[in-house]
Structures are given as C-alpha cells and as structure tokens.
Amino acid sequence: YNAADVKNIYVREYDAQSRDAMGNAVTNNSVYWKYVTPKVFGKNKGYIVAVDSDITLDFISNPTDAAPFGDTGSIGVNKYTTNPGVNHNSWNLVGQPFFSSFDLYYATQAHAPFYYYNGFTYAAVMSFDNYEVLPYSAFFVQAHGAPATLTYNGSGRALRNLRSILPFDEVDLYVKNNAIAEHVDRQRVRLSDDFSVNYELGNDAVKMISNDATVPQIYSKIKDLSNNTTYSYQVNAIPTSVTELDLVVTTGQNGTYTIELKNTQNLPNYTSILLVRGNEQTDLMQESYQFVANAGTTTVTNNWKLRMVRTVPTEVLQTNDNSIVVSTLNNDVYVSGLESNATINVFDMSGKLVQVVENVQNDTPVKIQETGLLLLQISTVTQHANAKVLIK
C-alpha cells in the first residue's frame, strides 16, 4: 500500500515446493502464487507485482546488501524433486542482480533453460542462447544442474552476440500478428539421435502461455513415453526418427497472421519443413504461411502438423532396412515388409521434395506423379528406409 498515491500494489512469490508436491501445471489463476510474509522482499528473489493503475514505486534496501557496481552475482536455488514428473521439479523464480542489462549466456548454463517474460509472452532461453534481460528483472528456472546456486558472470554485463554452432538440426518457427510487431511467439524443434521423445531437463523447454490472450502462441505437443503424458513444448528436442509433431497455434484477436521459418542454415540435414493443415501443406523452407483469424478468440488446432523431411542421400541404391522391399510394376511402386502404415516422401535427384504419400500399406500400388530417377524416403513408426526407383 502506497500512502502517498493511495494505490495498491499486489505482490506474490512462487511456491515451487507446492508445485512439486501437487504435480499440476496451471496456466490460469495458478494456485502456486503465495503471499509474501513478512512483507519484505528477499535479496535476489523474484516476485510478481501487479497494480490497478500506473504507479511509481521506490525500493530501498540496506546499503550493506546492495552492490550496484559489483561485477558478479550468485543466487541460491531451491531443489524439490519428490514428484516423479520431472517437469514439476525445482522451479525457481529468481532475479538478475545488476543495474545493467545482462546476457543470460553468462548465467549458470547447467540450469538452463531460463523462462523470461518479455512483456508480451515467455521466451525460452536455452543453453548458450544469447538473450538480454533487463536490470533487476525476474525469470523462471528449473534448477536441474549440479550447482546449488545460479551464478552471473560479470562478462554478461557487456552484451555481445556469441552465436554457437548447433550440434543438432533446429526448426525455428515464429508466429506473428502482421499488424502488431511486438505480438510474436517462437517455437523450436531440435533434432538429433542423442535426444529422446521424453521430457528431458536441459534439452526441452515446456510451453508457458502468455497472460495476454491477444498475443499469438505456437507450440508442439508430443507424448512422453515414460509416463504416457502429452506435454506442450516451446523447445522440443526429439530424435531424428520422429518425423511429425502436433502443432498448436492460438490467436486472441482478429487479423492476419504469418507463420515463418527462420535460420534455415541450422537445418543442413533437412530438405523440407511442412506445415500440414488437413489435406493442405506449405513447405516453410520455400515460403511463409499466412492465415486470417476472424473470431474474437480463435484457437487453431484442428489437424495441424509439423512434418520434418530429411535430405535423402543421392547415392542410395536400395533400402537400408532389410525388412522393407521396394518394387515397381507399370510405373507403380509397391512396398512390402512394413510393420505399420508408412509415409513415403518422393524426391527428385536434386533433393527437392516432389510428392508425399501417406498411409501406404503393404503391397498396395502407390501412384508416383513424377518421372525419371527418384529417391524414396519410407517411414513407419519403427522403420526408416531409403530407396532409388526409375519411373518412366
């Protein structure tokens, strides 16, 4: 309560221990915000502050506790690990302790990702991402690393872009409201044989929904096989054997929106990234996709998929899965040895995707639209094979 302005402020701190104990992720009216008792801000802790109207607040600290010109900082983090669901463990809302902005590249990377609210939506800052956070701002972190502290190296006060070479392929998607430049959300898919379909601390970042319903959101969904639970991801690290994800896009107001793929140089092993909407698809490697939201609140979820198509090496002469046999008859392709229905991606010899055939069954004719020497990429849930065929 500010007596001079006769205005209220509302302050809460995050109850990470209850989150771990209850094991529920809450997107609206979270039960994990608790009163600050006593009414004193703790050093280096993060808080959520709300006001009824604009107000200027002065914060005064004990001079012995403040180090405005210090070049390092360290914050203790709490670890709560009783819940078997690791996505509920060890959440902390912490603050960055400097008068200056800070690049989270220089915070303890063993605890990354960091979840920072940028004023419109949450940004997931992964290990070795460059990301500037404002002075004395707060962000969430799952303290999964070995250290019991989150340390800020003084080098982070000098902002610079130190782009790392990614040791994996990365799909970098954005959805934006064409009329409001700040209304942008980002979703990433990371692909490597070292990743798992299960939620992995440090590799994945769960989706935190913006509290501003007018800001578009984009995220993927996939089932964690360790507990049979489907999670929503802002950064989804998966093995290359996964070729398709459910994609959710939400909009909160009328307007024209664009979904685009950026940083395609981080996809050296993929030839197409397909946004699939029912029977329609757009190759985001070639063009962005625009759509119009006409309802006041629109949720775009029906039959939307993200399909990742790997580059097929041109030297492939036969299938590399001995259980799959490919043959041709009268310019139709037949596949046998499939353990379940397959998807066949058809490429020309330049590596361009020219056709996608879904739900292919054993020994049924597949009509190929192109002629010439073609490369086939055949995938089931458990099988992956490449083949070269000649269609006259």
Image: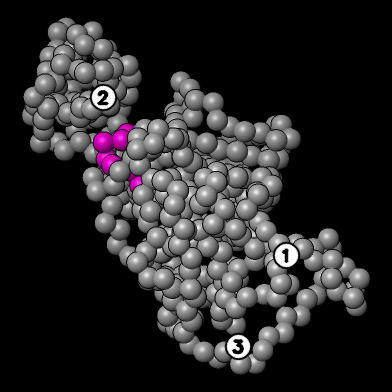
Kind of residue indicated by mark 3: Ala
- When the figure is inspected, residue 38 is found, relative to residue 158, above or below; the finding is above
Q: Residues within 10 Å of mark 2 (few under 14, many from 20)?
A: some
| The image quarter in which residue 347 lies | top left
Residue at (19%, 8%) from the top-left corner?
Answer: 363
Query: Where does the image place residue 5, in percent across and percent down from the top left?
Result: 90, 74
> Which mark is nearer the camera, 2 or 1?
1
Precedes in sequence: disc 3 or disc 2: 3
Q: Say whether residue 171 is visible.
A: no
- Residue of label 1: 11
Of 351 and 325, which appears nearest the observer? 325
Label the magenta part by its dominant secondary structure: loop
**Mark seen at residue 380:** 2
Of 374 and 203, which appears nearest the observer? 203
- When the figure is inspected, residue 222 is found, relative to residue 116, above or below; the finding is above
Query: Where does the image place residue 142, in percent across and percent down from the top left?
Result: 46, 59
Kind of residue indicated by mark 1: Val
In the rendered view, does 96 fall on the left or right side of 215?
left
Precedes in sequence: disc 2 or disc 1: 1
- When the figure is inspected, residue 244 is found, relative to residue 17, above or below; the finding is above
Q: Could you tell me which secondary element the residue under label 3 belongs to? A: loop
- Residue of label 3: 66
Query: Where does the image place residue 211, in percent across and percent down from the top left?
Result: 67, 50
Query: Where does the image place residue 361, in percent across and percent down from the top left?
Result: 26, 12
Of 325 and 22, which appears nearest the observer? 22
Q: Could you tell me which secondary element the residue under label 1 belongs to? A: strand
Precedes in sequence: disc 3 or disc 1: 1
Residue at (62%, 45%) from the top-left corner?
Answer: 27
Kind of residue indicated by mark 2: Thr
Find the magenta span and give its range: 237-243
> Which mark is nearer the camera, 3 or 2?
3
In the rendered view, does 73 fall on the left or right side of 209?
left
